[in-house]
Amino acid sequence: MFKEVSGFPAFLRLASHVLKIYPVCYNFRQQGFFMTKLIFRYNSFYDYMLARLAGEEFLSSHETEGKNYLSNIEGFWEPLNDKVFSHYQELGFVLPEYWFAYPVHHWKNLTPFDDPLTFIIKENLEEVVATIIHEVCHNFFGYYENREICDKIWKNVETRFTEEDSDTKKHLIIIPLAASSLYKIFGQEKTEHLLNNEKKYEGLERAWQIIDQNKPDFKNPLKLIFDLRL
């Protein structure tokens, strides 16, 4: 999300309605008839407003680049979609029929965020996928159908890590969930490279420190989350 940019939260609430990002859930989809789909959309007005909030200029070349980028990320994500979401279904999460995901340019002070699911345009599509999965995992905890499982997970972490800040607590949950999916789609070597890059990101360092000292096995992320200790 933005840092030190006034007006951003209000704009984000507006964007949630303008972009129509709220997903639909059908009970019968959870019974195996449908698999959640990530739908990529480039919205030049959204990108433009983020640029304005950052005090940067949005050019026609940005719009062209954003539109052209869609086919790249769509093609790369397509064979991964069902593998990613079936993994989270197996863990017990209820998923909507679809989520929208929006690529935007790397404006000043902007980092990816989950609602609306927004990620930075990059050439390295594996890094982009890792970011998307991370933000999708954040979305699980804002989706009402997952209230029971998410409350149980959150209370467990909150009780045992009372001295840690909220951001660290959240990422003690999100990191294992996201990493478990990356191992399934990318394998060990590539995933460890992606995760090592992630460890330097602001807001994740402390969570990664705690996770690493527990010698994590990401094959069973829920067990890892419940077994974490200082």
Image: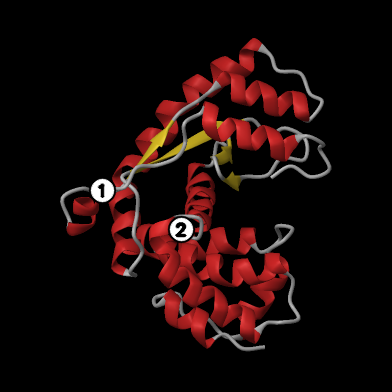
Q: Residue at x 64, y 30 (%)?
A: 105
Q: Residue at x 48, y 62 (%)?
A: 178
Number of residues whose C-alpha sits closer than 10 Å to that of mark 2, classed few (under 14), some (14–19) or many (20 or more): many
Number of residues whose C-alpha sits closer than 10 Å to that of mark 1, classed few (under 14), some (14–19) or many (20 or more): few
Tally of numbered discs: 2
Query: What amino acid type should be assigned to the residue bearing mark 1?
Result: Tyr
Question: Helix, strand or loop at disc 2?
Answer: helix
Residue 26 in percent (x, y) is at 26, 48
**In the displayed structure, does residue 179 sit left or right of residue 39?**
right
Question: Helix, strand or loop at disc 1?
Answer: loop
Viewer-nearest residue: 40 or 180: 40
Residue under numbered circle 1? 26
**In the displayed structure, does residue 114 sit left or right of residue 25?**
right
Is any part of residue 3 visible from this angle?
Answer: yes
Q: Residue at x 62, y 25 (%)?
A: 47
Is any part of residue 106 visible from this angle?
Answer: no
Q: Residue at x 49, y 20 (%)?
A: 67
Viewer-nearest residue: 162 or 69: 162
Residue under numbered circle 2? 140
Viewer-nearest residue: 128 or 227: 227
Query: What amino acid type should be assigned to the residue bearing mark 2?
Result: Phe
Q: Nearer the viewer, mark 1 or mark 2?
A: 1
| Quadrant of the drawing holding the N terminus | top right
Where 171 falls versus 58 (above or below)? below
| C-alpha span from label 1 to label 2 | 16 Å
Residue 224 in percent (x, y) is at 48, 81
**In the displayed structure, does residue 125 sit left or right of residue 211?**
left
| Quadrant of the drawing holding the C terminus | bottom right
First reached walking from the N terminus: tag 1 or tag 2: 1
Residue 128 in percent (x, y) is at 52, 45
